[in-house]
Image (cartoon, grey):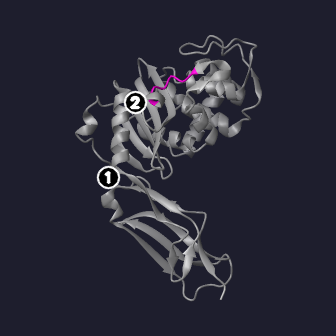
Amino acid sequence: MKTKFLSLFVLSAFALAIFPHHSPSQSAEAATLSHGECVTEVSSRRFLYERNAETNLPMASTTKILTAIIILDDCDIHETVTIPKAAEGTEGSSVYLRAGEQYTVEELLYGLMLRSGNDCAVTLALYHSGSIQAFAQAMNEKAVSVGAEHSRFVNPHGLPDSRHYTTARDLSLISAYAMQNKKFREIVSCKYFEPRNWQNKNKMLYQYEGAIGVKTGFTVAAGRCLVTAAERGGMTLVCVVLNSPQMYERTAELLNNAFSEYELTQLCTPETTVEGYAVKYAFSYPLTALEREKVKTEISVDSPIPEAEGEIAGQMKIMLENNLLFSQNLYIMKK
């Protein structure tokens, strides 16, 4: 008899953020609370901690996370860009671009994310869309596409505008999406870009074990804002704090709490067997020790088992108590 494999169909259903979110513990309140906070696990998009995470807030230069990932998704980073007159002298943080100079898209992205260059943001927006208004439309469309449905973007840099805002939850989703881009991770984790002598302003890269990005921000209206990605034990977390007087200290506390409480747990592996049949793909999810004891797998297999490759053979569900974590059709594949 030929060996058969029950493979997980490409279309999966993740029940995200379906559990009550944790309120701040005593240890988490050692630093001053932020106006909005969220910690998210990147691969599953599970929200591990939230506080005022759905409140509309300005986000200053953390806006540039979305700007950068749009450019990386849509543009050739090796192309050369001539700096437009409209970018020269952009207010706020700058790398002092001059009209007529030439930079590669990649160099401008490093200037954007390491030095928070507002002039880089304007240059990239105009290069991508031809106008700030058109690029803002692209930003809003991208945000919605990654699940950030409660934000509004009107510029590529985050300078104050009452129409420009996000939520801690939305910004964590945008950042989690961005962190799955290899080049984005390379840029935001870079401490020093030697070709242009640019040092990264993000102190978390120097102070926090496992930090791999992402972006700082500050305006009087937005206060101190910080998005941090950190990786430990194979688990990557994104922490967002908006209007946070002690943004570095608060971020470290929130990340420490999440890393100590949660573990990325593999719930389905290629070695998983059902009545002699094997599933093909792996699935992992961040869980607490108590939650791991409550996970169960429910599998229904058709009878008789279909012989033809590609036919539906059943379904797998992974449950946490009564909450669905993962569900896919099982299809026959022949080895």
Residue 240 colored in magenta in the image: no
Tell me, for residue 150, which label it has, or none. Answer: none
Is residue 23 in view? yes
Observer-nearest of 98 and 187: 187
* Relative height, residue 62 to residue 220 (above, below): below
Predominant secondary structure, magenta span: loop
Is residue 54 in view? no
Q: Is 264 positioned to the left or the right of 180 in the image?
A: left
Where residue 217 sits: x, y (%)?
47, 24
Please identify the quarter of the rendering in which residue 287 is found. Answer: bottom left
* Relative height, residue 269 to residue 313 (above, below): above
Where residue 309 sits: x, y (%)?
68, 78
Residue, disc 1: 20
Q: Residues within 10 Å of mark 2 (few under 14, many from 20)?
A: many
- At 61% from the left and 15% from the top, the residue drawn is 95
Separation (CA) of disc 2 from disc 1: 21 Å
- At 62% from the left and 84% from the top, the residue drawn is 306
Where residue 33 sits: x, y (%)?
30, 31
- Which range of residues does the magenta coloring cover? 199-204
- At 34% from the left and 55% from the top, the residue drawn is 288
* Relative height, residue 101 to residue 247 (above, below): above
Q: Is 29 positioned to the left or the right of 64 in the image?
A: left
Q: Secondary structure at mark 1?
A: loop
Quadrant in the picture for the N terminus: bottom right
Please, what is the three-letter code of the amino acid marked with disc 2?
A: Leu
Residue, disc 2: 242
Please, what is the three-letter code of the amino acid marked with disc 1?
A: Pro
Q: Is 307 positioned to the left or the right of 180 in the image?
A: right
Q: Is 244 positioned to the left or the right of 159 in the image?
A: left
- At 35% from the left and 38% from the top, the residue drawn is 254
Q: Secondary structure at mark 2?
A: strand
